[in-house]
Image (cartoon, rainbow, N blue to C red):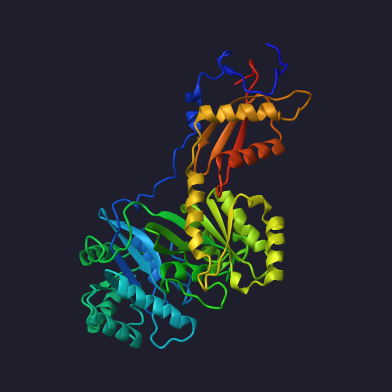
Amino acid sequence: MSDEYAGPAIEAGDGVADGTWADESEFTGWEDGSAEDDGFDQGGPAPTLAVVGRPNVGKSTLVNRLIGRREAVVQDVPGVTRDRVSHDALWRGRRFTVVDTGGWDPMASGLQAEVTAQAERAMQTSDAVLVVVDASVGATETEDAIAKVLRRSKRPVILAVNKVDDERAEADAAALWSLGLGEPIAVSGLHGRGSGDLLDAVLEALPTAPEEFVGSGGGPRRVALIGRPNVGKSSLLNKLTGESRSVVHAVAGTTVDPVDSLVEIDGQLWRFVDTAGLRRRVNQAKGMEYYASLRTQTALESAEVAIALIDSSTPITEQDQRVISMVIDSGRALVIALNKADLVDADRRAEVEDEVLRDLARVAWAQRINISAQSGRGVHRLAPAMTRALESWDRRIPTGRLNSWLGELIAATPPPVRGGKQPRVLFATQASNRPPTFVLFTTGFLEAGYRRFIERRLREDFEFTGSPVRVNVRVREKRGAKK
């Protein structure tokens, strides 16, 4: 068989006559169908347990023990958790949501007062409350204040006495009957001691269905709010939810844990995650910042679409571009929100356009929206943009239509000659969606520029707006080559 290449167009029967591939079924190994299901979105809403207590009693450590995985950021300093942070949990076949809160301090001011307000809001909106007390310290004025509030409420209360690492500390736990919140349950969030008994008590206190839930049926699409510190992620989440869901403060880096919120927009339910601002590369971060960066990456990987917030009142930075790179690498759908539009004058608006064209050229396919999270200007345009991006992210092109389109494209614009020979494309298939991934089977290597040309035309002709598109090439081995 000659090694000469007949031409660039896809030919009927190519790859079939010589027995290389029989039909499209040969390519099913590249099809994955859909994103993985985490198993928690099934069966409707779950009841909610709020975990409260004063700072540094080990709430986040205990939360990680209850949910069976390390999700809450933990560090041996008070005040690491600031927002209400939701985690899905499963025990004895029952699902429930654990809401980790910041330290409750009735005498706090400034940022800590905002944190306390979030904890109080969690107590008011949950189906049951878990109060955590440090066994080595005992009941303080703060615990007395919490108990006084909870005794007046109608919420079921579970009292967990943490840091009971051995039998010697059990007497300290028994002394907390005095709070009037029921039987103290001795646990060790660090070692897991007593965690099974605590989980059993939680299930007894929780109803089988949540008391309040707003939204329609079906699993909500998952959205990650991502950006560098202080670009307005928490302000946007608060504007969307219509409540003070995340702590907002002038101090950059207020958010540490990803903050989950169910938001209904125009009758459709979305699950938004407010993430920690990315200051630097993960491998250069330390301590709390390092774990916060990991949680941000995890939140992005579990999302379906990302809203990348950029502060339009200041020049686009390297951190902004790093955020965009994270979204591209994750393969998630993308909407770019240029926030703080109310602070931009006419001169700055022209500068923003130039910066976007220059610094964000690689994501020209993403929709860009000017918004003001503070005033709400332009926020209503986010939901249609996310819907369009997710439609592109989910889209599949039938193999016959794809090959017909590609044959016409290559006939009009053949691939460049490489090594004196012109490669032919034998067959193409969409291996997967989420994101759309295409595989071209060829007789030779396709230059990177030509692959980008095919990607651009795929976007234009099949309307892949807001979604990354990946084009992979597999070169057919010559007949007689060793396997």
Judged left or right of residue 231, residue 433 is left
Indicate whether 468 appears above or below 154. above
The image position of residue 464, as x and y in percent, is: 55, 44
Q: Farthest residue toward the front?
A: 346
Confirm whether residue 289 shows in the render: yes
Confirm whether residue 162 shows in the render: no
The image position of residue 180, as x and y in percent, is: 22, 82
Q: Farthest residue toward the top?
A: 1
- The residue at 39%/72% (across/down) is 101
Q: Using the rendered view, name the quadrant where residue 203 is placed.
A: bottom left
Judged left or right of residue 368, residue 138 is left
Q: Is the C terminus in the top left, top right, bottom left or bottom right quadrant?
A: top right
Q: Is the N terminus in the top left, top right, bottom left or bottom right quadrant?
A: top right
Judged left or right of residue 343, residue 53 is left
- The residue at 27%/61% (across/down) is 196
- The residue at 62%/74% (across/down) is 343
Q: Using the rendered view, name the quadrant where residue 250 is placed.
A: bottom right
The image position of residue 313, as x and y in percent, is: 65, 71
